[in-house]
Image: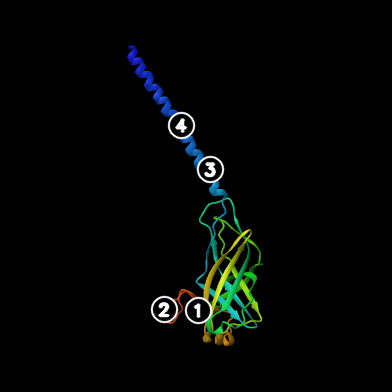
Amino acid sequence: MNDTGKRVSGSRRKRFEAVHKWAATATAVLALAISLYNFTQLQRKPRIDVALPHLVRIEQGKFVILYIQPTLSTRFKTEKVEVISDVRLKLHPTGSITSSKRPDFYWRENSAWGYEPSSGGLTYRWAGDPAPFVVSQDKPQQPTIAFEADGWNFQPGRYEGSLQLHRSGRNPLVKKFCLVISKEVIDKFRTDQRSYQFFRNDVPRSIFPNKAPGCYEFFPFSSFS
């Protein structure tokens, strides 16, 4: 090989080595960036999604108890968890009953419902005291919470409500809803021997033409008693 050929071969080898070093450096930088991104994602606080159920149960006598089962979950993988320190229920009357007394609900306990084959009804049992709970991607929560208001009863009318989930060092998560109480269900509370009544927010208007959109309303057709 003459001198010209040697110079060309050496020049190609140098270019190849330079490109190889550049590619290796770029790959290392990209891997570092991906690692830093993954680390950052794992260290961030989880974003909690809260969904309200389509059905709530209410009983009324000397006091009112409202049973609600929200779903709390997060779609993002993170090493950190969210701690729900307290859950509160707010309800205030609107329209013609705006000036009536507002209830003061407190978190009474967590509960669970079970099916009783012999009676075809539901059985109620205590499931836990009111206490902070953890939400993470691999540990979504769906507690059935019993809220109690003493010295107060529903009147017929519309109520605006909110479920407030309090977190340490962050603003509470708030889910709003509406509830319509009819004279029919007030009479049910007085005369029906069942301990609770069903309210749904997803009944089609083909069944209840006068239903308020999105509101929980009395649902008399439950198969459970």
Q: Residue at x 36, y 15 (%)?
A: 6
Instruction: Sort mark 4 into few (<14), some (14-19) or many (20+) by Cα contacts within 10 Å.
Output: few
Q: Nearer the viewer, residue 93 or 132?
A: 93
Q: Are marks 1 and 2 in contact (CB under 8 Å)?
A: no
Q: CA distance from mark 4 to mark 1?
A: 65 Å
Q: Pick whichever of labels 3 and 1 is earlier in the sequence.
A: 3
Q: Position of residue 177 (x, y in %)?
A: 52, 72
The image position of residue 27, as x and y in percent, is: 46, 35
Instruction: Name the residue carrying label 4.
Output: 24
* Mark positioned earlier in the residue sequence (1 or 2): 2
Within the image, what quadrant is residue 194 found in? Answer: bottom right
Q: Name, please, the residue furthest toward the front.
A: 99
Q: Earlier in the sequence, mark 4 or mark 1?
A: 4
Residue 49 at x, y percent in the picture: 52, 61
According to the picture, the residue beneath numbered tag 1 turns out to be 217
Using a 10 Å C-alpha cutoff, classify the residue at mark 1 as few (fewer than 14 neighbours), some (14 to 19) or many (20 or more).
many
Q: Which residue is mark 2?
A: 205
The residue that disc 3 covers is 36
Query: For the residue labelled by badge 4, is the local secondary structure a helix, a strand or a loop?
Result: helix
Q: Which numbered disc flags the more N-terminal residue, 2 or 3? A: 3
Which mark is drawn over residue 109?
A: none
Specify which label sits upstream in the sequence, 4 or 2.
4
Real-space Cα distance between discs 1 and 2? 12 Å
Disc 1, SS = strand
Which corner quadrant of the image does residue 164 belong to?
bottom right
Colour scheme of the rendered structure? rainbow
Q: Identify the amino acid type marked 1.
A: Glu
At label 4, the amino acid type is: Ala
